[in-house]
Image: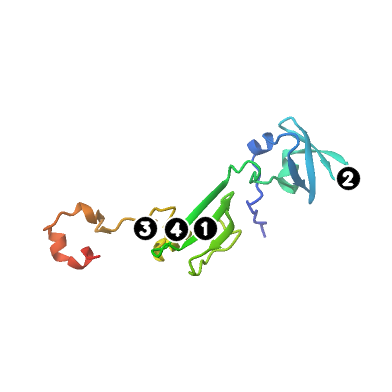
Amino acid sequence: MKNIRLFENFTSLVDFENIKPGFRVKYMGRDCEVISNDGTILELEDEDGNKFDVNYNMFKQKGYLPQTKMEENIYRRDITFTSRQNRNIFITLIGGRIDTIKNESGVNFPFEIGQIYNRSIEVWACNNGFKIDGKDPCPEEKIFGIRKKDIPKGHELRMLYPGKFRK
């Protein structure tokens, strides 16, 4: 049976080449500091002071490069869900994953810390009447592929299907 690779810790060659000296990585379960990187070989030092050289394939199999840079806040995003009653749910994303949730709305928020932010959260917000950062996440309603606002008053579609045009 083939081993299924998990891509959570996957490191590309470009990422490997861009690891700077002083950066902290994990290799074989140990925290290590990068001493030098020439693009093909990393020189690492663990907590005990042991130094060893690691090439890209070795690091890809047994190493872990943290994907989020917390100190730079590059991958941080704050999102506010606002209900019709102006009750809010605040979430913080770091690296595309939910880091914190503050629910002041009283509505059951079905997502957890650590989950990846994806389209299903926007669908949940649309179905439950929440706005995301003040914008409506719901797609515009269409009738037979035509936006409602593009069908003029008195058109045959409005006469044939009056229920589709009521709010």
Which sits earlier in the primary sequence, circle 4 or circle 2? Answer: 2
Q: Give the residue type that dot 2 points to.
A: Asp
Left or right side of 138 for 159: left
Quadrant of the image occupied by residue 65: top right
Which sits earlier in the primary sequence, circle 3 or circle 4? Answer: 4
For the residues marked 3 and 2, what is the alpha-carbon distance in whole angstroms? 55 Å
For the residues marked 1 and 4, what is the alpha-carbon distance in whole angstroms? 14 Å
Q: Give the residue type that dot 1 points to.
A: Phe
For the residues marked 1 and 3, what is the alpha-carbon distance in whole angstroms? 19 Å
Residue in the picture at 17% in, 66% down = 162
For the residues marked 4 and 2, what is the alpha-carbon distance in whole angstroms? 47 Å
What secondary structure is found at the residue carrying circle 1?
strand
Q: Quadrant of the N terminus?
A: bottom right
The reply to whether discs 1 and 4 touch (Cβ–Cβ < 8 Å) is no
Kindly identify which residue carries mark 2: 48
Q: Which mark is residue 90?
A: 1
Q: Give the residue type that dot 3 points to.
A: Cys
Near mark 2 (Cα within 10 A), the count class, few <14, some 14-19 or many ≥20, is: few
Q: Position of residue 141 (x, y in %)?
A: 29, 58
Kindly identify which residue carries mark 3: 138
What secondary structure is found at the residue carrying circle 2?
loop
Near-viewer residue (44 or 117): 117
Which sits earlier in the primary sequence, circle 3 or circle 2? Answer: 2
Kindly identify which residue carries mark 4: 122
Which sits earlier in the primary sequence, circle 1 or circle 3? Answer: 1
Quadrant of the image occupied by residue 113: bottom right
Which sits earlier in the primary sequence, circle 2 or circle 1? Answer: 2
Which sits earlier in the primary sequence, circle 1 or circle 4? Answer: 1
For the residues marked 3 and 4, what is the alpha-carbon distance in whole angstroms? 8 Å
Q: Position of residue 11 (x, y in %)?
A: 66, 43
What secondary structure is found at the residue carrying circle 4?
helix
Near-viewer residue (17 or 150): 150
